[in-house]
Amino acid sequence: MPLLDIRNLTIEFVNDNKPIKAVDRVNLLLNEGEILGLVGESGSGKSLVAKAICGVTSDNWRITADRMRFGDIDLLRLSPRERRKIIGRHISMIFQEPQACLDPSASIGRQLKQAIPSETFKGPWYKRLFPWRKERVIDILHRVGIRDHRDIMRSYPYALTEGECQKVMIAIALASQPKLLIADEPTNAMESTTQDQIFRLLRRLNQNNNTTILLISHDLRTVSQWSNRIQVLYCGQTVETAASKELIATPHHPYTQALMRAMPDFGQPLPHKSRLNTLNGSIPSLEHLPLGCRLGPRCPYGQRECIVRPPLTGTKHHQYACHFPLNIES
Ligand SMILES: Nc1ncnc2c1ncn2[C@@H]1O[C@H](COP(=O)(O)OP(=O)(O)OP(=O)(O)O)[C@@H](O)[C@H]1O
């Protein structure tokens, strides 16, 4: 059964009565216990989707969807207050720049204790008289790979490395024992060894605790190593979705192919002053989106038919939105 099932999610910003559509009819299906990678270049709407799921929105946002189910709960039928309660209890999010998300004036131990909701206490009532929160903090810190819990709990955020800060953020996210963890570019601007540690930690949490993870990133190759399935967004629309291995082996959408080619293979020597493989032009602004296929003006395979929006087609396991898909045997 899907843990999160969203159909036709649309996000608009309304300024001076003029709506600007940033996310356009995106479907998102997350099965329990899987890692789904949400990939796309900067400005494609990944963070907006995550914020809409968590309900972190502003007054000028208009969010509509045909379906928004979390497990067997229909989120569209709930009042904003009830929805916030469900989301706060079962969904946690971690962001890029972990150091900026931690309170600089409180010790890590204090911040972690505050993040543990009292309803997660299990056991006989008299155990509440003991420092159960401290025990939980130590347990969570060990689970995220921090062995020296005493030192970390006493520290303030400025004294920690980036990797340690992100591990603490993951520990805070886990404190409420969420069913779904949304990781929005969790390793952005980190060293590659630290990136590896964080991804390994996320996978361990997924395998050991069955935590479902929505992994947001612009790096298709890295995400493909750590996720079961990938959904590629471009300009607020889904362009392709498939199992990670299949998507990398046989991408059907030119944008997915371009994302893969944009990552230089440093295993092979690059000729001096050779051009990197990139698409022409840049991602259009939300006010000037092209008609039909939004990749059209940048697409190396674009043709006249592309002025009509391609529907999402394919099989249940591999869908793409392109009139002229690649790697398809005719
Ligand atoms: N509050 C807002 N008001 C107006 N436009 C916004 C707002 N938040 C985001 N946008 C616009 O919506 C588009 C998608 O933004 P979003 O942050 O989801 O991109 P992203 O794919 O997550 O990119 P990044 O990796 O850079 O965060 C961008 O063009 C952005 O400028």
Image: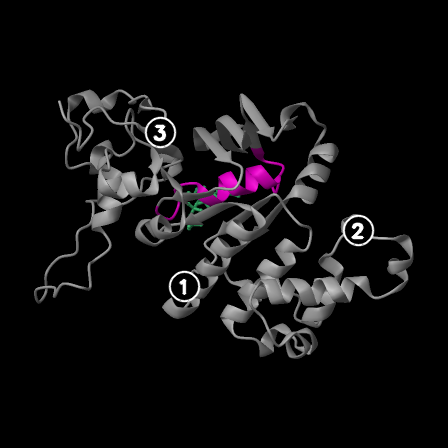
Q: How is the image coloured?
A: one colour
Residue 122's label in the rendered image is: 2
Which residue occupies 47% across, 62% down?
Answer: 198
Mark 1 → mark 3, Cα distance in angstroms: 28 Å
Q: Is residue 48 magenta?
A: yes
* Amino acid type of the residue that numbered disc 3 sits on in the rendered structure: His
Count residues near mark 2 (Cα–Cα under 10 Å), then give few for <14, some for 14-19, many for 20+.
few
113, above or below 89, in the image = below
Residue 317's label in the rendered image is: 3
| 31 sits left or right of 112 in the view | left
Which residue occupies 72% across, 57% down?
Answer: 115
81, above or below 197, in the image = above
First to last magenta residue range: 41-61
Quick check: marks 1 and 3 in contact, CB under 8 Å? no
Quadrant in the picture for residue 307 = top left
Q: Quadrant of the N terminus?
A: top right
